[in-house]
Amino acid sequence: MQNLIPSEVYSSLILQYLYDAVIVTDLEFRITSWNLAAERIYGYNAKEVIGKSAMTILRTVQNNSTRENRIIELQTNGIWQGEVFQYTKRSERLTILSAVSFLKDKSGQTIGIIAINRDITEENKIKEELVDSEERFRMSFDNAGVGVCILDLNGKFLRVNKKLRSMLGYEEFELIGKRTNEFAYEDDKVLFDSFRDLALSGSKENMIYEKRFFSKEKNILWFEISNTLVKNRDGEPSYFVVHMNDISGRKNAEFHLRSAIKEAERANQAKSEFVANMSHEIRTPLNGVIGFNELLLTTNLDSDQREYVRNAISSAHGLLGIINDVLDISKIEAGKLVLNEVTSNLKQIINDSLGVLRWKANEKGIELRLEEGPGIPEIILIDATRLRQILINLLGNAVKFTEVGGVVLKVNATGISPQKIKLEFAIKDTGIGISEEQKTHLFQSFWQGETNSKRRYGGSGLGLKITKSLLDLMNGKIEIKSEIGVGTEFRFFIECSFGKENVDQDSEGNNEIHKEELSHYRESILSDISPRILIVEDNEMNRELLKRMIQKYIPNSKIIEAVDGLEGVRFFRESLPDLVFMDVQMPNMDGLEAATEIRKQPSGSKIPIVALTAGALYEERKKCFEVGMDQFLTKPIDILALNEILFHYLNRSTLE
């Protein structure tokens, strides 16, 4: 089809609808043509600008060039291109990419100037923001306080910041293009590979883990690593961003802490073993001292001799009390002391505790009395042994430190519920008193109020520590009031259940008179039997002592003596005894091994085995029961306790 539009008109239409502004001026720079794009960009319509100076309308500025220089370049090259700043009708500054050339007629004569201008204000703004963003990212990346790197999907370094380079000791060119695992500890290389597989499968796109690396100096560094998979706009995996925080110091501290804990545990274990061994070594000779003196009391002695023997026994029991205190502290510190709450007679516990100290109070010429409040229950559920121990510790201190006046034990009860009661015990003395500075140390192990060479009162310094620990176990509370030269009052509170049940009169806590009555009754029963009794004990004196104690109650008994576990097992098979006394610590084969072997014998399951142990620790008693022993006697052997065991296992009904 024939084009009906003249070429001049056609060209004019093209220029009119171009996206870029087309501005034509004469040689005096007066505007002669102004297309629609120019109207859109600058805000002027054609009527407002035609015939006016382009310099006035556009107010063109260029930072690195002048108008004269641009004209010279245009005249020289026939075209000028560059960025300039121009202004809209509303005086808004625009960044314009401009191309300016001469306009010629058909004969080649220059008739004007044509400029094609593109508004790149927004484009430049976006570019500047991108540049700023890139710069901020670069600054943040390079100057981050932790190591940061970018890895490709195979784990190769793409970028590495200064901190990471400093930590590893490598230059950037030594890391770029290499896999992180080339610098990782061998056992830890699987960590990145495992995460990479999870990330690429879509299971997990970020993970925090700890990993070891080798520095350039071959030092092992611990890093806490935060690894994140970054995806592109299409959701496809692109690269990994990794933050690496050096935790070598923390790991070293943890290592030293673990080592310190293990060392402390080893030291505590060594201490427990030492305490157990010392207990054994001290109790073994004490067994002889107390046992033979108690046997001596059963012979014909005059009054002076009997007093001397009783004093020797009392001194030995004093030493035994110190040993028991040390063992209690060891058990408390190891968390092995467990309360044994049973139905007990409260008044009997109180009277027993006062009875232990009454002779000492009488000896010193001071008063020791009890004041009971209303509503004191007779029967309570309590660990009677430990309550008695608390009372004896506090009463013993009060008597010890009182020279004039006396000691009073006050007991009061307050109901909490129909089944529960709160007991308050107050031990008040007129003794030497305790200073404020001393009060801060009262419940510490091995602390004593007197530390100089003129000590008058003695003691191990463990009683109050044990008392406080026992009350803590009972969920109790202890308070103190004291004044130097006036006296001291200890007050403690415990809660317990109470009732009206009868207490088993054979239980622990019965008075010595009742025990001796039972002993005489049992002795009359045991004197008519003739059992075979095997004693397995490596200490000759202890064998002789136990033999004489048994024969006191059972004169017709046949005693078989073995010096160690091996001999004990052999003698058991040969003699088939009715009762076995087995020492725990022996050479060649100890008592635990020997008891295990005896229980394997055809008749070994029926014969009672009583452990002889100088170690009163919970662990040792537990081991005795675990290998099948039936009962235990703690050295020094209590002759009345032995009487009870002999009667229990060897009375006529048992033997028949």
Image: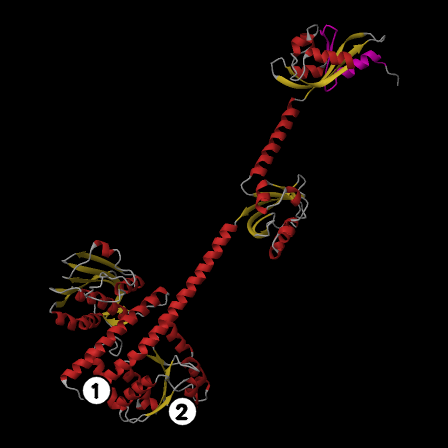
Q: Is residue 30 rendered magenta in the image?
A: yes
Q: Tag on residue 298?
A: 1
Is 298 covered by the magenta stretch?
no
Marks counted in the figure total: 2
Q: Amino acid at mark 1?
A: Thr
Q: Position of residue 77 (x, y in %)?
A: 78, 15
Give how far across and how far down residue 324 sits, in percent: 29, 71
Residue placed most toward the observer, 476 or 71: 71
Q: Give the label on residue 285, or none.
A: none
Say whether residue 58 is left or right of residue 107.
left
User: What colouring style does the render use?
Assistant: secondary structure
* Residue at the spot 42% in from the left edge and 84% down from the top edge: 565
Q: Secondary structure at mark 1?
A: loop
User: Nearer the viewer's eye, disc 1 or disc 2?
Assistant: 1
The stretch of residues the image draws in magenta is 4-33
- The quarter holding residue 575 reads bottom left
Q: Which residue is more in the foreground, 14 or 156?
A: 156
Classify 10 Å Cα crowding around label 1: few (below 14), some (14-19), many (20 and above).
Answer: few
Q: What residue appears at the point 26 percent right and 80 percent down from the top-left corner? A: 290
- Quarter holding the N terminus? top right
Question: Does the image show residue 258?
Answer: yes
Q: Which amino acid type is shown beneath numbered disc 2?
A: Leu
| Residue drawn at (14%, 68%) of the image | 368
Q: Is residue 181 above or below residue 457?
A: above
Residue behind mark 2: 576
Residue 419 visible in rendering: no
Query: Does residue 602 appear left or right of residue 120 in this picture?
Result: left
Considering only vertical position in the picture, is 262 above or below 39? below
Q: Position of residue 281 (x, y in %)?
A: 34, 76
Task: Name the one closer to the observer, 341 or 156.
Answer: 156
Q: Is residue 85 above or below residue 370?
A: above
Quarter of the image for residue 457 reads bottom left
